[in-house]
Image (spheres, rainbow, N blue to C red):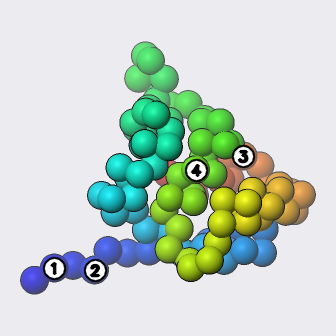
Amino acid sequence: MTAKQATKKIDLGGTQLELKLTGRNIINIEKRLGKSMMSLFMSGDGSMKLPPINEMLIVLQGANQTHGVTEQDIIKAFEKYFEQGHAPMDLFAVLT
């Protein structure tokens, strides 16, 4: 018996995203980033850090399961999200 992997639905500046990380998603995201996803959230001394917005958006795009949402759509949605009063820390909370 296999368990269905849960998805997380979020509204990013009016764009509905359905996020799910699979092994293949993680490999593709890490190829785009050129580093481990874990290194996004941890500094060299092992403490937590806030990754750059562009890297967080790469993770969102890579995990998104909503058909037809492009990288440019994600960027525009983030701009609206930010204009709506959300902070980068809000996006960080979604990713973690």
Q: Secondary structure at mark 1?
A: loop
Give the amino acid at mark 3. Pro
Tell me the residue at 32%/74% (across/down): 5
| 39 lies above or below 22 | above
Q: Secondary structure at mark 3?
A: helix
Instruction: Give how far across and how far down residue 87 sits, in percent.
Output: 77, 49
**Pointer 4 or 2: first along the chain:** 2
Which corner quadrant of the image does residue 66 belong to?
A: bottom right
Residue 81 shows in the view: no
* Residue 74 located left or right of residue 20: right
Mark 3 burial class by Cα count in 10 Å: few <14, some 14-19, many 20+: some
Marks 4 and 2, Cα distance to the nearest angstrom?
24 Å
Which one is closest to the eye, mark 1 or mark 4? 4
**Pointer 2 or 3: first along the chain:** 2
Q: Identify the residue under disc 3.
A: 88
Q: Secondary structure at mark 4?
A: helix
| 50 lies above or below 88 | above
Foreground pick, 45 / 58: 58
Give the amino acid at mark 4. Ile
Tell me the residue at 41%/51% (across/down): 28
Instruction: Give how far across and how far down residue 95 sits, in percent.
Output: 53, 54
Instruction: Give how far across and how far down residue 89 sits, in percent.
Output: 68, 46
* Residue 54 located left or right of residue 29: right
Which one is closest to the eye, mark 4 or mark 2? 4
Which corner quadrant of the image does residue 77 belong to?
A: bottom right
Marks 1 and 4, Cα distance to the nearest angstrom?
28 Å
Give the amino acid at mark 1. Thr
Q: Identify the residue under disc 2.
A: 4
Which one is closest to the eye, mark 4 or mark 3? 4
CB under 8 Å between callouts 4 and 2? Answer: no
